[in-house]
């Protein structure tokens, strides 16, 4: 294992609030990588009973075969030695039903249309969520403010309501980016249909809720994740949310403000 890879895995802060759902399996697996294991072996050793896939080296993916199709037919996830694929594997471990549902829809679309230069609306939406998605259960007032991008109301005026909310990250690229937290990191948030009581229940509910027609319209809402109360010490200061490059008003509101 290259020294740079081990260093990257050693820099993961498993105390970060967004990593708590993944810590039980993730921290020992990351340590195995630091100790010299390949990522696919480290993930394979963490496999839980009933997982729909195994993890394999990237070299197992045949040349000319689409990644999603290979996973669907072989039930093996080609895995490189990097943080991106490591977090993908951890999400498979925690959301096996949802990941398999996303994989099935991707594979079906590829079988019907082939791999094109530009993904169709459904494949694009599935990829956005797979890479950068999050799930949020919150009081309706918070959702209304979030959808309006009323950041001051969302994070300051309604701040006490965040005690009733719970957000769980799904996107593996999002998790990778948060290894080095930066204020502009944004998640594409999907509304959880039930209160988040456990990851297993959340996985089952989400997998059954993915409707291709509705998801092709990208029913996601952008949310700067480090603005979530309790997730980043700097957001205790109100001026944290005064950065227009991160907490942007909707285009219509910007136009009115400029008149």
Image (cartoon, rainbow, N blue to C red):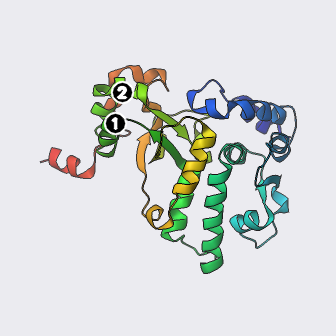
Tell me where residue 53 sits by quadrant. Answer: bottom right
Instruction: Report the side of 185 relative to 64 (left or right).
Output: left
On screen, residue 218 above or below 170: below
Whole-percent x, y for residue 184 in the image: 45, 39
Q: Which residue is mark 2?
A: 161
One can see residue 257 in this view = yes
Could you tell me which residue is drawn at 52 percent across and 58 percent down? 210
Q: Which mark is residue 192?
A: none
Of pointers 1 and 2, the one earlier in the residue sequence: 1
Contact? badges 1 and 2 (CB < 8 Å): yes
One can see residue 176 in this view = no
Could you tell me which residue is drawn at 22 percent across and 52 percent down? 252
Whole-percent x, y for residue 195 in the image: 48, 38
Instruction: Report the side of 147 relative to 183 (left or right).
Output: left
The total of numbered circles placed on residues is 2
Q: Which residue is mark 1?
A: 142
Element at badge 2?
Answer: helix
Tell me where residue 29 sits by quadrant. Answer: top right
On screen, residue 238 above or below 190: above
Q: Between 48 and 45, which is closer to the camera in this rendering? A: 48
Residue extending farthest to the left is: 259
Tell me where residue 73 sits by quadrant. Answer: bottom right
On screen, residue 56 above or below 3: below
Few, some or many residues within 10 Å of mark 2 (<14, 14–19, 20+) = some
Quadrant in which the N terminus is drawn: top right
Could you tell me which residue is drawn at 76 percent across and 73 percent down? 64
Could you tell me which residue is drawn at 32 percent across and 33 percent down? 154
């Amino acid at each position: 294992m290259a020294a740079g890879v081990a260093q990257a895995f050693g820099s993961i802060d498993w105390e970060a609030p967004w990593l708590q759902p993944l810590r039980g399996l993730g921290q020992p697996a990351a340590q195995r990588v630091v100790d010299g294991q390949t990522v696919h072996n480290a993930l394979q050793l963490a496999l839980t009973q009933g997982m729909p896939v195994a993890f394999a080296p990237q070299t197992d993916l045949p040349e000319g075969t689409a990644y999603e199709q290979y996973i669907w037919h072989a039930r093996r996830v080609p895995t490189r030695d990097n943080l991106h694929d490591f977090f993908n594997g951890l999400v498979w471990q925690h959301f096996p039903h949802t990941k398999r549902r996303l994989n099935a829809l991707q594979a079906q679309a590829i079988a019907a249309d082939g791999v094109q230069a530009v993904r169709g609306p459904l494949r694009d939406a599935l990829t956005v969520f797979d890479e950068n998605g999050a799930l949020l259960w919150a009081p309706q007032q918070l959702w209304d403010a979030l959808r309006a991008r009323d950041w001051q109301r969302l994070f300051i005026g309604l701040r006490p309501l965040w005690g009733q909310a719970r957000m769980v990250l799904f996107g593996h690229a999002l998790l990778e980016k948060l290894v080095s937290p930066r204020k502009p990191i944004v998640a594409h948030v999907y509304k959880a249909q039930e209160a988040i009581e456990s990851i297993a229940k959340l996985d089952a509910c989400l997998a059954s809720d993915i409707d291709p027609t509705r998801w092709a319209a990208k029913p996601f809402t952008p949310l700067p994740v480090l603005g979530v109360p309790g997730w980043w010490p700097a957001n205790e200061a109100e001026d944290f949310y005064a950065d227009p490059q991160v907490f942007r008003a909707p285009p219509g509101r910007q136009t009115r403000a400029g008149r």
